[in-house]
Amino acid sequence: RIQLRLPARKVLVTGGRTHSDSQAYQVLASAEIFDPATGTFSPVPHMGATRLSHIAVSLGKERVVVAGGLSETNGEGRYTATAELFAGGAFHAISNMVATRAAPAAALLYSGEVLVTGGVGQDPLEPDLPTNSLAAAETLRAVCAAEFRYEFVRTRSAMNQPRNGHTLTPL
């Protein structure tokens, strides 16, 4: 599960997977908010897609972008490039990422853009290569934040080394 601290000190929990002895694991589209003042979790409307090993980055003002990961449809898992914005207590579809990817790293840049790098998936510029660790990088930028319009744009260069399971830390 991905957890992010919201400005009111609440925490948004998105996706992940569940498993019980009676069934195989299931990828989740559910989300909830933890309020540390009351010690309780409250459900919020589901995301538009199931997600596991995705990114979630707080943009401030109780807005969170959730993107990529492994999505499950009809019991079959696939890497996804879809993205959503949590705002106003609900999820809103935004433009897809450039690359389908799970387990990428992401960081909010000082410009307000979000940098997304690596992960495991398929690079659209290298469609003949097998699914593998990615060097591809892209940024999310607001086109018109008031209308929930955001777009992902490939960076001028890829990372020097393909990677997943890594971190991004603004300096």
Image (tube, rainbow, N blue to C red):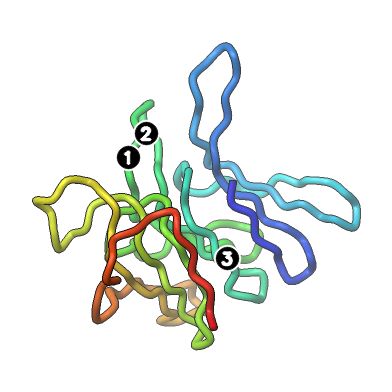
Assess disc 2: are there few (<14), some (14-19) or many (≥20) residues with their C-alpha within 10 Å of its C-alpha: few
- Mark earlier in primary sequence (1, 3): 3
Question: On residue 73, which mark appears?
Answer: 2
Question: On residue 64, which mark appears?
Answer: 3
Assess disc 1: are there few (<14), some (14-19) or many (≥20) residues with their C-alpha within 10 Å of its C-alpha: some
Residue 140 vs 85, above or below: the answer is below
Which image quarter: residue 97?
bottom left
**Residue 10, image x and y in percent?**
77, 61
Q: CA distance from mark 1 to mark 3?
A: 23 Å
The kind of residue on which mark 2 rests is Thr
Mark 1–mark 3 CB contact (< 8 Å): no
Single out the mark in the foreground, 2 or 1. Answer: 1
Residue beneath the point at 60% across and 57% down: 90
The kind of residue on which mark 1 rests is Arg
Residue beneath the point at 45% across and 62% down: 105
Q: Nearer the viewer, residue 62 or 27?
A: 27
Element under disc 3: strand
Assess disc 3: are there few (<14), some (14-19) or many (≥20) residues with their C-alpha within 10 Å of its C-alpha: many
Residue beneath label 1, please? 78
- Mark earlier in primary sequence (3, 2): 3
The kind of residue on which mark 3 rests is Val
Residue at the limit of the structure toward the top, as seen here:
22
Query: In the image, 93: left or right of 4?
Result: left
